[in-house]
Image (cartoon, rainbow, N blue to C red):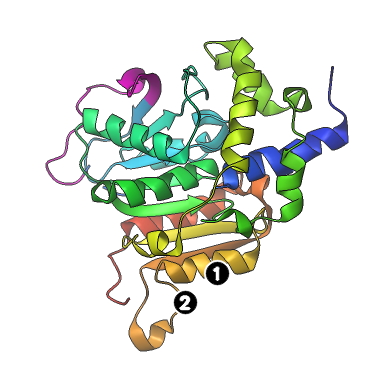
Amino acid sequence: MKATTSARTHVRFVVLAVAAATLVVAPIASGQRIGRRGTGGRYAFVNGLKMYYEVRGPQRGTPIVFLHGAFSNIESDFGKILPTIAKTKQVIALEQQGHGRTADIDRPLTYEQMADDVAELLRQLRVTKADFVGYSMGGGVAMYVAVRHPELVRKLVFAGGASYDPDGFYPELLEGEKKMTPDAFAGTPWLKTYMRIAPNKGDWPKLVEKIKVLDLNWHGLSEDQVRSIKVPTMLIVGDADVVRPEHVVKMFRLLGGGVAGDLVGLPRARLAVLPGTTHVTLITRTSWLLSIIPEFLDAPVPSGK
């Protein structure tokens, strides 16, 4: 049964927004080589998971790892920016457990596990340092990679719903997610794409339930854990995103931002607020994203705090 228009709108702002939000683009570092040759889609066995991933672009410099949002996949979130970035940069894009072409397995979805899966994939590819660009849930995964596997991260971009604690979200969104059902996605592009590329199309209800459990039981990162992230980090949010602006600013300060740059130099953290932008529409701001993400990843590490 098809969802009503209001239900689909609810899904847009609760599911892809909250679900994912609860919670690259520079020359592989000198001497690094992608262990499995060739480009395009392939699979790796990672912690019991048959994970789909793609490698694109010239094999030089620091690779960029792209991490998609909840219920999504590589093409849906990054299809408009990857072709441009891959002209000059090496990119590795992957699809998490139960998403896209990666089949689900019998284990819950957690940020810790997804971060460990990413780290293991990079180990198999012989990548020892990378830049990370994550959208929504993918940004949360990137944060957990930086906390659990700091040696892998050179720079980090968290785009859309940037947060480290569930208190950062508008409460009504989390309340709405408690009522989320698989049928609410009828007619949405996320379900249509899932039915086109997922290996086990009947697993959609399981994915919806696992995302609900992930979001509604997420306790976040501590302030000390956020402070422990010392790499340059850029937070990108819409001015009508799913997180409260004051929470994002607090996160920005914990990451080293919020200083008078003319007096002490630029900090290692950056904050970009896109005007007239919601959580869902943020990833469609192609020209803005292509103007700020590559520049941030290519820039020298600031000398300030």
**How would you rate the neighbour count of disc 1 (Cα within 10 Å): few for under 14, some for 14-19, many for 20 or more?**
some
Can residue 283 be seen here? no
Pick the front one: 162 or 287: 162
The residue at 60%/53% (across/down) is: 166
The residue at 36%/32% (across/down) is: 117
What segment is highlighted magenta in the picture?
29-53
User: SS at mark 2?
Assistant: loop
- Tell whether position 210 is magenta: no
Q: Position of residue 298 (x, y in %)?
A: 32, 57
- Tell whether position 42 is magenta: yes
Pick the front one: 133 or 172: 172
Give the position of the N terminus as an image quadrant: top right
Q: Residue furthest bottom?
A: 263
User: SS at mark 1?
Assistant: helix
What residue sits right under mark 2 in the picture?
A: 258
Give the position of the C terminus as an image quadrant: bottom left
Q: Is residue 90 left or right of residue 104?
A: left
- In this rendering, the answer to whether 82 lies above or below 225 is above
Q: Is residue 41 left or right of residue 101?
A: left
Q: Quadrant of residue 274?
A: bottom right
Can residue 44 be seen here? yes
Distance from the alpha carbon under mark 1 to that under mark 2 = 8 Å
Residue type, numbered disc 2: Gly
- In this rendering, the answer to whether 116 lies above or below 43 is below
What residue sits right under mark 1 in the picture?
A: 249
Q: Residue furthest left?
A: 31
Q: Quadrant of residue 283?
A: top right
Among numbered discs 1 and 2, the one appearing first in the sequence: 1
Q: Position of residue 140 (x, y in %)?
A: 48, 47
